[in-house]
Amino acid sequence: MIQYSTQSAFSILNPLIIVIFGLALYTIIVYNLYRFIATRDIFNLNLGQYNRAQHAGVFKFFAVILYVAEYVLFFPLFLMLWFITFSTILNAMTTTPNTEMVLLMSMAIIASIRIAAYYKQDLAKDIAKLIPFALLAVVLVDDISSVLTWGDKILDLLYLLPAMFNILVYYFIFVVCLEILLRVIYGITGALSKRDEKKVTSPTRKGNI
C-alpha cells in the first residue's frame, strides 16, 4: 500500500520546485538581456533637449557632442555588464577555461552582436541568445550538479582579471569606439536615405506657360 506524507512529498518536490523556478528565472533574465544588448538604440536619453544654442551651426555641433556623450558616458557601463555576463557564461561552459581566450571571445561576441544590431536586429538577437541558451543546454544534458562548481570558476576568473587589466582596457576602448562609429555611419546613411526619399516624393515644379 502506498503511503503519502507531507515530509516525503516535500523531499520529492523540493528539487523539482528549485529547478523549475531556477530555469524560469534564468530564461527570464536571458530573455531581457539578449533583447537589450541586441537593440540598436539602447537608450533614449535625448540629451539634445539640453542644447540651448541659437545659431544653427553651433546647435548642430553641440547636438553631435551630446549625441556622442550618450554612448561615451553610458555605453561603457552597459558594456561592462554584458562583458561580465558573457565571460561568466563562457567560463562556466568550459571544463578547463583559458582566461585570456574567455575574455577575448566574450568581447568578440558582444562586438559582433552590436554590429549585427545595426544590420538586422533579429540577427543580433539570435546571436545574443545563442551562448546563454547553449549553457542551459549543457547543464540539462550534462549534469545540473555542475552548477555547484560555477562559484569556484567565477572566483578563479575574478582572481585572474587584474593580470588582464591592460588587455581589458584595449578591448573596452575598441568596442566603445566601434559603437560610436556604427552610430555615426547609421546616422549618415539614415540622413541620406531620408534626403533621397524627399527627392523622390517631392512634386515637380511646372514652369509658367
Image (cartoon, rainbow, N blue to C red):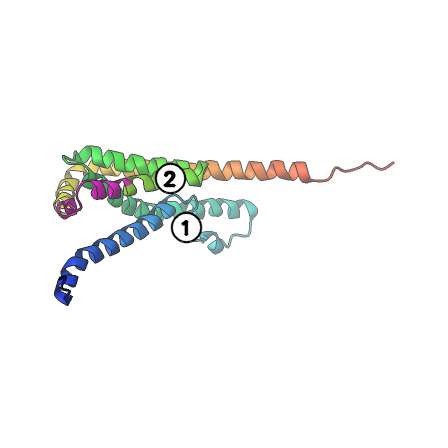
Q: Residue at x 48, y 38 (%)?
A: 186
According to the picture, the residue beneath numbered tag 1 turns out to be 43
Q: Is residue 132 left or right of residue 121?
A: left
* Camera-side residue of 67 and 25: 25
Quadrant for residue 162, please give it: top left
Name the amino acid, label 2: Asp
64 on left or right of 161: right
Asked if the magenta segment contains residue 142, the reply would be yes
Query: Dividing the image into 4 quarters, which one contains the C terminus?
Result: top right
The question of residue 182 being in magenta is answered with: no
Q: Which residue is mark 2?
A: 126
Residue 148: mark in rendering: none
Q: Earlier in the sequence, mark 2 or mark 1?
A: 1
> Which quadrant holds the N terminus?
bottom left
User: Where residue 21 sits in the image (x, y, percent)?
Assistant: 25, 56
CA gap, disc 2 to disc 1? Answer: 20 Å
Q: Is residue 206 shown to the viewer in this render?
A: yes
Prevalent SS, magenta region:
helix
Q: Which residues are magenta?
A: 134-150
Q: How many tags in the picture?
A: 2
Closer-to-camera residue (55/183): 183
Residue depicted at x 30% and y 51%? 29
The percent coordinates of residue 18 (x first, y second) are: 20, 56
Callout 2 secondary element: helix
Q: Residue 94: image x %, image y %?
A: 18, 36
Mark 2 vs mark 1: in front: 2
Where on the picture, by quarter, is residue 180?
top left
Q: Please determine whether, in this image, residue 17 is positioned above or below residue 102.
A: below
Residue 204, image x, y percentages: 74, 37
Camera-nearest residue between 181 and 100: 100
